[in-house]
Image (cartoon, rainbow, N blue to C red):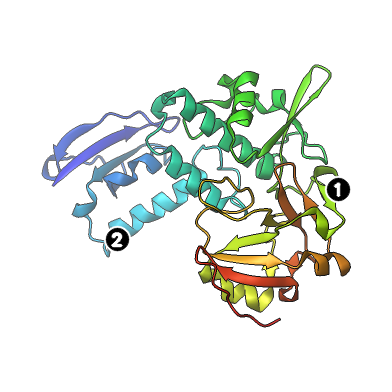
Amino acid sequence: MRLRSFGYSSEKFKTNPQNSDASSVGLPSSFLFLLVPYDMWASISGIRILDRCRIYLATSSTIHKRSPCFALAASIKNNTNSNMSSPFSHSSRGGRGLEMQNDRERSRGRGRGGGGSSKDRIDALGRLLTRILRHMASELNLNMRTDGFVKVEDLLKLNMKTFANVPLRSHTVDDVKEAVRKDNKQRFSLLEEGEELLIRANQGHTIKTVESENLLKAILSPDEITVCVHGTYKKNLDSILESGLKRMQRLHVHFSSGLPTDGQVISGMRRDVNVLIFLDVRKALEEGMKLYISDNRVILTEGFDGVIPVKYFERIESWPDRRSIPFQT
């Protein structure tokens, strides 16, 4: 069996790869022996482990899935994922999980070692800014106003890296402006106050500092919007019909002001949804539900205590065939 060995110190990993046969490897008593699938190395490389440690990496095929070594390796991978120094190691509260997965998929293979194209760097910057401004400002001790704005200068002082592996501190104000300009869903707003430039996410917040009245424009009449639709998935529909639409960890339930039509960018809805829930805006407003609209035309509501009861659903359709889905209020 072919193995790769790596030596480490307590302060920092010092990688010294060398190929060797398992039979020829000598294991000093002061070293810990771990057999770990090779494809987990990227995760393990971010962890500090014991005072002196040597990890031997084998290909996944050499470890049976039911063996203790495989279980140990999986445990290390899981623990490392939650403790690695990354833009998102600070918290994993709701509102981030799927976004993080999507960002990693988009950034896979990009910007290794700070490389990548200028487009990739700006795209990764925009995605990190979205995460910070929606979810992380409080825990990063950013001074966020109740309308969601923070100083760009403060953002660029953070000791974080984008998914393109570029330090946030190496980006410029012009890079931030470019990220805002290129964002096709218009997730950001910029504001100049004197000599200071401020930025905010237009919607999607989990941060409690943000107040709806200061961030958004209130909708006072159903005539102000022609479509108010929430996109979801068939796998979620039974739960929604049982207990209503919930905002989960975010401040609002999100609705789109348009349909996910091919070739058109729609904010407030994912592109791959297969169920559309239309809100009865007139009934909701008449019965006291507060509705808002963001600068990028996303319709938001806190519902009643964070829930929109089924009785406010106007209709439900499958997408893209738009067949009516029956339901009871």
Q: CA distance from mark 2 to mark 1?
A: 55 Å
Residue at image position (47%, 31%) is 164
Q: Classify 10 Å Cα crowding around label 1: few (below 14), some (14-19), many (20 and above).
A: few
Residue at image position (49%, 41%) is 84
Residue at image position (67%, 83%) is 328
Amino acid under disc 2: Pro
- For residue 288, side relative to residue 296 (left or right): right
Q: Quadrant of residue 241?
A: bottom right
Q: Position of residue 175 (x, y in %)?
A: 59, 22
Q: Quadrant of residue 145?
A: top right
Q: Quadrant of the C terminus?
A: bottom right
Q: How many marks?
A: 2
260 or 57, which is in the foreground?
260
Amino acid under disc 1: Glu
Q: Position of residue 170 (x, y in %)?
A: 56, 20
- For residue 116, side relative to residue 257 (left or right): left
Residue at image position (30%, 42%) is 55
Q: Is the residue 315 above or below the residue 44 in the image?
A: below
Q: Mark 2, mark 1: which one is toward the viewer? A: 1
- Helix, strand or loop at mark 1: helix
- Residue named by callout 2: 68
Is residue 19 visible in the rendered image? The answer is: yes
- Residue named by callout 1: 213
